[in-house]
Image (tube, helix red, strand yellow):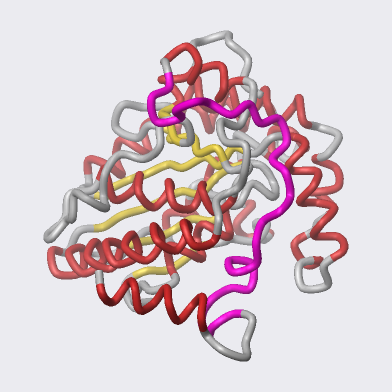
Amino acid sequence: KLVIEKSLTTIYEAPNRSAPVGVSEADIKPSREPIPDAEPLDDPLDIAPHIRSRYFRENIYPYAARMRSREYYEHKLPLQIELIKLQNWMRDSGERAIILFEGRDAAGKGGAITRFMEHWNPRTARVVALDKPSDVELGQWYFQRYIRNFPTAGEIVLFDRSWYNRAGVERVMGFSTDPEYRLFMRHVPMLERMIVDSGIHLIKLYFSVSQKEQLRRFEKRAKDPLKQWKVSPIDILSKDKWREYTEAKEAMFLLTNFEVAPWSIIKSDDKKRARINAMRHVLNIMDYEGKDPTVAYAPDPSIVAYSHEVYTAGAPIG
């Protein structure tokens, strides 16, 4: 506790600099932008199942304001200490883990990955963010280029987008054919069963951003010279294909939410709150040596839910 308090003091009282070394300027500056489509709940931690389902389906945000930086750091530092414990346990035990980070463009996947990796030892944790397939890869089995990046003993691999590209962007943008899509949907349950049966922990996270918040982030990226590299032609096209992406996402949840590898949906209109709850969720479902139950407990139920908890077949998702 003393170490955390000293760290917070360093962050907030450091003289003559806007952000301390190793801390993102975006993490320090206050988030003053309002949250679109917010309908604040009296108690988001005690949300009724039918209300929870509606909030996730319709992309309604349960908090009026974004998480303040001090509150963010009060949660973030202890969670990152727990993440180090998790990594050390996996290294010593030889366990393996794959964490998928999926979601629409500008949903906050990259920022969440950065906070997971921030204090991990890069020798036993790495990020896989594959470019579009090469001509050679196009001639291979679809899953082949992903499988070659799977973890070895003691390693954690974070996929910044994954084989689910075929269920999302490829489906919407016409980069794959209907037969290729159907074959993917037949293969993916077998693949993920084999992954889990081989002893690899497989966690699938979907970051869910509202249409208004996504547009706000696109506009902000376009004006920021440090973030303009994030704006791709696909981003521009995707703005006009919200409904198509929604239908693809719904089909993905219906067809690939397996008992051994369920989808966890994380509401990400507030990036800080999404990062905190993503870390807490992963720590909560993993068993590791030295786990602190006062830190690694269930996430905010109004921010994180399994896909089967919030909708049924045929019900639309926003």
Residue 189 found in image quarter: top left
Indicate whether 273 appears above or below 245: below
| Segment tinted magenta in the rendering | 19-47
State the residue at coordinates (27%, 62%).
82
State the residue at coordinates (28%, 68%).
84
| Quadrant for the N terminus in the image | bottom left
Q: Please state if 19 lies on the left or on the right of 276 as rendered.
A: right
Q: Position of residue 162 (x, y in %)?
A: 53, 49
Q: Position of residue 150 (x, y in %)?
A: 38, 58
Between 221 and 263, the one nearer to me in the picture: 221
Between 110 and 269, the one nearer to me in the picture: 269
Between 182 and 237, the one nearer to me in the picture: 237
| Quadrant for the C terminus in the image | top right
Q: Position of residue 44 (x, y in %)?
A: 46, 30
Q: Position of residue 116 (x, y in %)?
A: 43, 62
State the residue at coordinates (48%, 55%).
159
Q: Please state if 19 lies on the left or on the right of 185 as rendered.
A: right
Task: Answer whether residue 24 is magenta in the image.
Answer: yes
Q: Residue furthest bottom?
A: 16
State the residue at coordinates (80%, 40%).
238
* Label tally: 0
Q: Please state if 268 lies on the left or on the right of 245 as rendered.
A: left
Q: Please state if 257 lies on the left or on the right of 15 as rendered.
A: left
